Image (cartoon, rainbow, N blue to C red):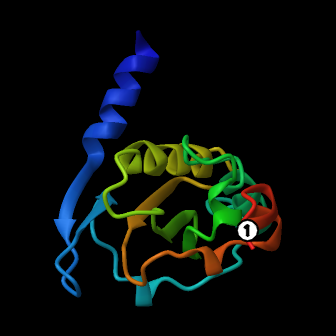
Amino acid sequence: MFFNKKKKEEEQEVIELLDESNQRPRMQIQEEVQTEDLKPIDVTNGSVQTIDVSLVWDALRECYDPEIPVNIVDLGLVYDLKVQENFLYIKMTLTAPGCGMGPQIASDVRRRALQVPGVRDAKIDIVFTPPWDTTKMTDQAKLILNIP
């Protein structure tokens, strides 16, 4: 019961906004953050733990679009990852703007990011500019999906 309640709360956090640049819907978790204010830092005092960015990337490699057998990193869906103290900002996209799995994928990305040691909070911003295409995929992902 608790798991189902938590899942519903995470899904309710996802809200739709209009992307000012192209008026397409975008999904966002939590409040707007000025991304230009986010700069990677390395602080090791008692209240702030350094986040190992490679562990964040490893965690994101555990996230999949349920319809595609390749993780979101190798698909090229993650456009940006920024760290500020114990906070992560992840800008990503979906393979198609109308993807019905967007809220679930964003929720999974946030859940996995929060499991990385030192991460206290994460904001996932789904954008559609620039649009995703197969050129953003790794060679390994193209091989798995039989894309030349």
Q: Is residue 130 left or right of residue 110?
A: left
User: Which image quarter: residue 49?
Assistant: bottom right
Q: Is residue 141 left or right of residue 64?
A: right
Please state which amino acid type lies under the numbered disc 1. Answer: Val
Which image quarter is the C terminus in? bottom right
**Residue 21 visible in the current orientation:** yes
User: Is residue 60 or residue 114 the one in the foreground?
Assistant: 60
User: Is residue 133 or residue 3 the one in the foreground?
Assistant: 133
Q: Position of residue 22 (x, y in %)?
A: 22, 84
In percent of the image, x 37 and y 72: which residue is there? 127
Compared with 83, 120 (above or below) is above
In percent of the image, x 48 and y 68: which residue is there? 92
**Residue 52 visible in the current orientation:** no
Residue topped by disc 1: 53
Which image quarter is the N terminus in? top left
Q: Is residue 95 left or right of residue 12?
A: right
In percent of the image, x 73 and y 68: which residue is there? 53
Q: Where is residue 88 in the image (x, y as percent from the top left)?
A: 54, 65
Q: Where is residue 119 in the image (x, y as percent from the top left)?
A: 60, 55
Compared with 32, 114 (above or below) is above
In percent of the image, x 18 and y 65: which residue is there? 17
Q: Position of residue 46 (x, y in %)?
A: 69, 60
User: Is residue 37 or residue 112 the one in the foreground?
Assistant: 112
Q: Residue furthest top?
A: 1
User: Which image quarter: residue 144?
Assistant: bottom right
Within 10 Å of disc 1 (Cα), the crowding (few <14, some 14-19, many 20+) is some
Give the total number of marks visible in the rendering: 1
Q: Is mark 1 on a helix, strand or loop?
A: helix
Compared with 37, 124 (above or below) is above
User: Which image quarter: residue 71?
Assistant: bottom right
Q: In this view, does 20 lie to the left or right of 103?
A: left
